[in-house]
Amino acid sequence: MTEILSPAAPDTLPQVVRDFLQAVAGRDANAVARCFTPDARYFLAMPHPAVEGREKLQAVFERVLGEADRVRWDIVTSSVDGDLVFLERVDRFWFGENEAPIECVGVLRLADGLIAEIRDYADLGAWKERKAAATGAPSEG
């Protein structure tokens, strides 16, 4: 099994968060969806509207993970405070041999052992430019 957590990601991360990161690295949208509550909300890029509900999240992850040939989200730093988990990440996507990384901070709220909400903060302009460069496609803006 490929290790997906950097040394900065402590073993104290809740299991569901570790499962979520492993499912992302495995490009398994079904396993990703199982990490969420049925009514979960994921703000993929604040302040844009959230994707709401486990089924819609699975569909989004099928598309996002399916576009890339390989995915790994590296944890730079993390903190857990009750039902809140803060993750400083570098989300890495490979298109063929070309990598498109994006720095991100995610705030996760847990409920009943599952992820109830994620708010991700990233520079979408930088992501679009890097993805376009990696795929050879025109930048979306």
Image (cartoon, rainbow, N blue to C red):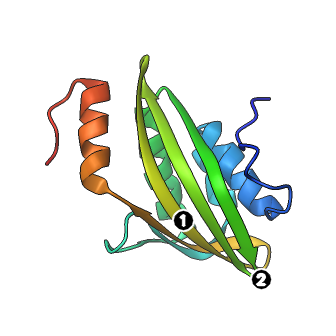
CA neighbours of label 1 inside 10 A, class few (<14), some (14 to 19), many (20+): many
Vertical placement of 130 versus 77: above or below? above
User: Which residue is painted at 37% across and 71% down in the image?
Assistant: 46
User: Which residue is painted at 78% across and 79% down in the image?
Assistant: 112
Point out residue 125 in the picture as x, y percentages from the top left corner: 24, 52
Point out residue 56 in the picture as x, y percentages from the top left corner: 47, 62
Q: Amino acid at mark 2?
A: Gly
The mark nearer the N terminus, 1 or 2, is 2
Q: Is residue 50 left or right of residue 1?
A: left
Q: Is residue 11 left or right of residue 125?
A: right
User: Which residue is painted at 32% across and 46% down in the image?
Assistant: 127
Mark 2 = which residue? Answer: 82
Closer to the camera in the image, 134 or 65: 134
CA neighbours of label 2 inside 10 A, class few (<14), some (14 to 19), many (20+): few
Mark 1 = which residue? Answer: 106
| Separation (CA) of disc 1 from disc 2 | 16 Å
Vertical placement of 81 versus 73: above or below? below
On the image, which quarter does residue 101 sit in? top left
Point out residue 62 in the picture as x, y percentages from the top left corner: 48, 45
